[in-house]
Amino acid sequence: MKFGYMPSFEIDLISEINFAKESTLPSDGAPFLQSKKEGFDFIEITLNLKLKEYTDKFLEDIKNTLNGFEVLGHIHWEIDLSKGDEKEIEKVFQMIEIYKQIGTRKITIHPSSGDEKNILEIKENNLQALSKINNFCRENKIKLLIENSEKGCFTKAATIKNLVMQIPDLAVTLDVGHANLNSELDEFLKFSDLIQHIHLHDTLDKKDHLPFMNKDNLESVVNKLKSINYNNSITLEIFYSFKNNKYLPLNLIEKKELLVNQQELIRTCFSKNTK
């Protein structure tokens, strides 16, 4: 099992890579603090839509900082594949080229629900766009994975499976939080052979990207993943918490403490015998 995390846009990417490579446990007793420390195995990067920021010099700095450390790619969720717009597909190609330069071999992309006024047309546009993107990835020896959405017409397991089965060598990134928001986790696990990556975070009151503050919730999810013998990569996708009943973004210190402790808690849950 490999564990990584997804950094926020507003944080310096070089420092985030260094944190992923060298993270240590905090000493002030964050939630579910574990005594054993293990660093992250990879980092999953979402490129900013302003691709001009990724100059040759910046990409060389990223590559040198990674120094062989595994990096996964995540296509920005605002890319819109629902209208068959070739300009949007070209943006994805440009992102894939950048990912290739820094050594990425696995990329996750969201299908796009658009305005949902014509579901059949939207699904067909996504199918055509993702087929082109997948072909581009295969030419560059990169694995493409489709992520289930939080809302819209790509939340159901059956819809994602149907899409994936129509495109050669495509696989699934299972976003556990998105699946739980739509009561679809058990349905996704029925085609476990297609799941090659996981985004893991908790949900509460229809909000996601939260840490697991309830140990029972985490153990329930982990036991389900263990039941399908999942043993691939897991990205912690944690950006928010509830403070005084308000859904707020985590600050840098809070996030790093939670990420390290959540990883150790999850590793411990996976090492236990399934109940």
Image (tube, rainbow, N blue to C red):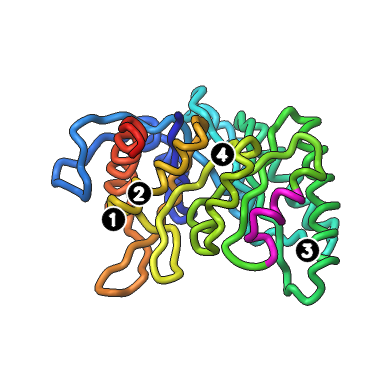
Residue type for callout 4: His
Provide residue 266's location: percent of width, then percent of height.
34, 40
Q: Sequence-wise, which precedes: disc 2 or disc 3? A: 3
Q: Quadrant of the N terminus?
A: top left
Residue type for callout 2: Leu
Q: Residue at x 69, y 65 (%)?
A: 153
What residue is pinned by disc 3?
82
Q: Are marks 2 and 1 in contact (CB under 8 Å)?
A: yes
Residue 268 shown left or right of residue 5 in the figure: left
Q: Are marks 4 and 2 in contact (CB under 8 Å)?
A: no
In the picture, residue 131 is in which quadrant? top right
Of 135 and 165, the residue lying toward us:
165
Q: Residue at x 43, y 45 (%)?
A: 236
What residue is pinned by disc 1?
214
Of 103 and 258, the residue lying toward us:
258
Query: What number of labels is visible?
Result: 4
Question: Secondary structure under badge 2?
Answer: helix
Measure the C-alpha gap from mark 4 to mark 2.
Answer: 18 Å
Image: magenta residue range: 153-163
Label 1 vs label 4, nearer the camera: 1
What residue is pinned by disc 2?
218
Question: Secondary structure under badge 4?
Answer: strand
Of 211 and 137, the residue lying toward us:
211
Measure the C-alpha gap from mark 2 to mark 1.
Answer: 7 Å
